[in-house]
Amino acid sequence: MTTDPTRLLEQSRSPLLRELLSAAREEQPSRAGLERTLLAVATTGALTAASASAAASAAGAKGASSGALLVAKWLGLGAIAGLATTTVALGLDSNPRASSPAASVAVVAKPSPAPRAVVAPSVAALVEAPAAPAATSLAAPPARPAASLARTSDAALAAELAALDAAKTALRAGSGQRALVLLRQYERDYPRGRLLPEALGLELNAFTSLGDPASARAVAQRIVTNFPGSPQALRARDLLASP
Amino acid sequence: MVALGAETTGFAAGEREVAEAAPSSPRLSELVEQHYAFVWRLLRRLGFSESDSDDAAQQVFMTASRRIADIRFGSERAFLFSTAVRVASRARRSTQRRREVFDAGLEDELDPAPTGDELLERSRARAALDAILQEMELDLRVVLVLYELEELTSPEIAELIGVPLGTVASRLRRARQDFEARIARLEASRRTGGTR
């Protein structure tokens, strides 16, 4: 049986060491980041389902509409529920630090001169840069007034999420056409939206629910072309690789 | 979860896969809500900036979503941990981050903040910590972060990373020595005017 040593923060006499460790312990992710992940997970789950039924449909099966029902049902049970949760009871809400303006500023303030820099490129770019002020995106480092930008971006992201929620609701109600209208409106309103990959993922689902595998594959190709490093691209590639 | 492309010979297969995918969703949402902060902070200490940690965390959970059926109940955090470390290792391998860049960056970060803004101070402190951590061996860094920052116990760490308790104790001892030595060098450097 071992006894754990006293933690450095409690025992060290070095003010610098304590300063660094306490700063790190206090750090919390932003709510926006959590919301985006919940959205991505929900969307990808749906994409997985959509890919499966689309692939089956493309294989010449007759039951696309049945598959669509299943997709819609899944969306209703899972994806929508997951998203609704984010607006009500995020786990981070219990932590006052997480909901502080500073906590939300950092991620929301991420400059997005191009469609959302998806995972792979930004991760790769990250390590090339020297340690930079934490609120700055290393992949896209232009100096900008962070606080005001953050507020603007925060509101924009909320609006984007709301727009996608509406499309999801339409999908849940079994109205793929309505969802497509909303998603196209989203693309018009946010041509460089940060949730564009997620929107395309939903569009793919919508086409699948309508029994239109050709259009679904076209959307999948758009995802792979424009957002090759996005989580949605993984599923899109699966769909494109299927017969 | 779903093996796309494995069975695409008829709709029944797709239907079955869709049906299998459905029950995982609530578990996935729960997974994200329960462990997002842990994964995100871990990624931060493994070298990602705040905004890149968002993307990397998303990648970790997307991986979990694809393999949710393989993740044993009770082992979720261990799965997320190992995935996060892999993501970080891959990112680290994919680029060459030079030591001199670290050093230069570290000195900049430790430059006293002219504004006195506490948030900025905290941000700089974290950047300085991260610069130090990046120079440590990954195995040591991980144990240090889990113990000193996430405040896990040694047995918890042993279970999480899948090594014997004695190995955790050994790594933790070495990690703390290494970390404290680096801090001491930095303090000495600051005292002698190394950072203005």
Image (cartoon, coloured by chain):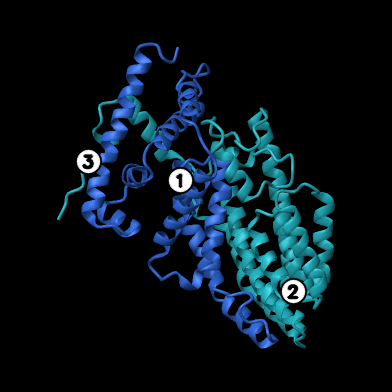
Amino acid residing under circle 1: Arg
Discs 3 and 2 lie in a common subunit: yes
Give the chain letter at badge 3: A
Q: Is residue A234 left or right of residue B87?
A: right
Please give the name of the residue rendered at 58% of the width and 61% of the height, measured from the top-left corner: A85
Q: Secondary structure at mark 2?
A: loop
- The outermost residue toward the left is A1
Q: Which residue is mark 1?
A: B41
Q: Secondary structure at mark 1?
A: helix
Foreground label between 2 and 1: 1
Amino acid residing under circle 2: Ala
Horizontal and vertical percent position of residue A184: 83, 59
Q: CA distance from mark 2 to mark 1?
A: 38 Å
Residue A181 vertical position relative to residue A76 in the rendered view, above or below: above
Q: Colour of chain B?
A: blue
Residue B46 placement: quadrant: top left
Tell me the number on the disc at residue B171.
none
Residue A135 vertical position relative to residue B40 in the rendered view, above or below: above
Q: Which chain is the one coloured cyan?
A: A
Q: Is residue A137 left or right of residue A163?
A: left
Crowding near pointer 1: few (<14 within 10 Å), some, many (20+)?
A: many
Horizontal and vertical percent position of residue A227: 71, 53
Tell me the number on the disc at residue A173.
2
Q: Which residue is mark 3?
A: A6
Q: Secondary structure at mark 3?
A: loop
Please give the name of the residue rendered at 72% of the width and 45% of the height, measured from the top-left corner: A156
Horizontal and vertical percent position of residue B184: 30, 24
Give the chain letter at badge 1: B
Quadrant into which the C terminus of chain A falls? bottom right
Quadrant into which the N terminus of chain A falls? bottom left
Amino acid residing under circle 3: Thr
